[in-house]
Amino acid sequence: MISSKIIGVGSYLPEKILTNADLEQTLDTSDEWIQTRTGIKKRHIATEDQKTSDLATLAVINALKNANINPNDLDALILATTTPDLVFPATAVRVQNNIKMNRGFAFDIQAVCSGFLYALQLGDSLIKSNKARRVAIIGAETMSRIIDWTDRSTCVLFGDGAGAVILEKTDSNDSYGIIDIELFSDGSLQDILAVHGGISSGNLNKKIEMNGREVFRYAVTKMPESIKSLVNKNQLNLEDLDWILLHQANERIINAVMDKLGINIEKSVSTVPHHANTSAASIPLALDHYMSSGRIKSGNLIALAAVGGGLTWGSALLKI
């Protein structure tokens, strides 16, 4: 059987940092209040002249360097984002142009915080169907553009950034790679986390609105359910997992999911304190940071899971 494996990882975070202490200057909040409820200490914010495509470009360049391949070794580029540069064309084609990839194809997908998993599924499917040999998968966001900076219930949660992986075709003799991915959505829950504006609704100035209690409830239900389902489907045990890499939204969510799984918190990946919630970028950002630091090692079995607006959710199993 043909499969795909990750051969390179990369990320980029804007240089501008916004700390909790900075937010204290403009909001009725405190560092203690934010950390106690979220675990977040700081977040990176794109400058006015930085677009989502700029962040994505730097992340994929770093992933290409890590994989030791050139842009024209790619057959496709898939960008998961909920904060595109323009209405059209796709932000992905701008990244394609930036890296001087003059072959193959590029496109965006939108599944909010689950976007990277959706893109990973598409890239894996392209490779398994022999439509591509190498695919760049990017999650990139400038969430600061759609935040109401006067709303302390949401603005403290989000940050900007980008992460990328390079997928390559492998064969059945290679035990490394993507083992399985499952995706889900439930449109009846679309209003618990949304930006109620857009092209056809005629209002592009709306900001993030969230029912935090409901988002928390579904996050700590859907992610462990999907991980357990995927592990059982592939005749594995939760104890076989070396790492659990959840969407990096909130330390409380990570702790609750690990508790529901009955897995030691030391097996969880967390970049929440330093990155905050970067939506579709959070999983590849965290993966790069943990692999670059040597904490995630070759041969490790990892479960990824995310939940996002839509409601969308899913999980993936891979061996690095």
Image (cartoon, rainbow, N blue to C red):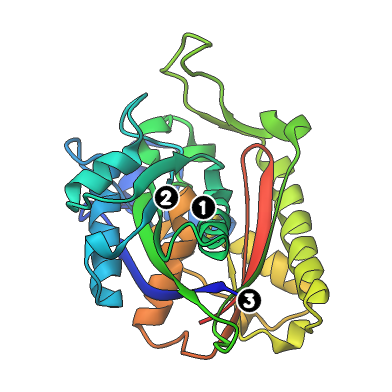
Residue 119 badge: 1
Nearer-the-camera pick, 32 or 112: 112
What amino acid is found at the position of numbered circle 1 in the picture?
Ala
Residue at 74% of width from left, 41% of height from top?
214
Q: Does the rendering let one see residue 174? A: yes
Q: Quadrant of the N terminus?
A: bottom right
Are circles 1 and 2 on residues that touch, CB within 8 Å?
Answer: yes
> Residue type at mark 2?
Ile
According to the picture, the residue beneath numbered tag 2 turns out to be 78
Residue that carries the numbered disc 3 in the rendered image: 1
The answer to whether the residues at label 3 and label 2 have Cβ atoms under 8 Å apart is no
Q: Horizontal placement of 235 versus 69: left or right?
A: right
* Residue projecting furthest to the top: 202
64 above or below 310?
below
Label 3 amino acid? Met
Please give the name of the residue rendered at 36% of the width and 38% of the height, measured from the top-left corner: 144
Q: Residue furthest front?
A: 130
* SS class, disc 3: loop
The picture quadrant where one finds residue 171 is: bottom right
Residue at mark 1 to residue at mark 2: CA–CA distance: 6 Å
Q: Is residue 46 above or below residue 127?
A: above
Residue 212 rendering spot, x and y as whole percentages: 65, 41
Secondary element under disc 1, as helix, strand or loop, is helix
Residue shown at the point (47%, 84%) measured from the top left: 296
Give x and y (percent) for residue 45: 29, 47
Which comes sooner in the sequence, label 3 or label 2?
Answer: 3
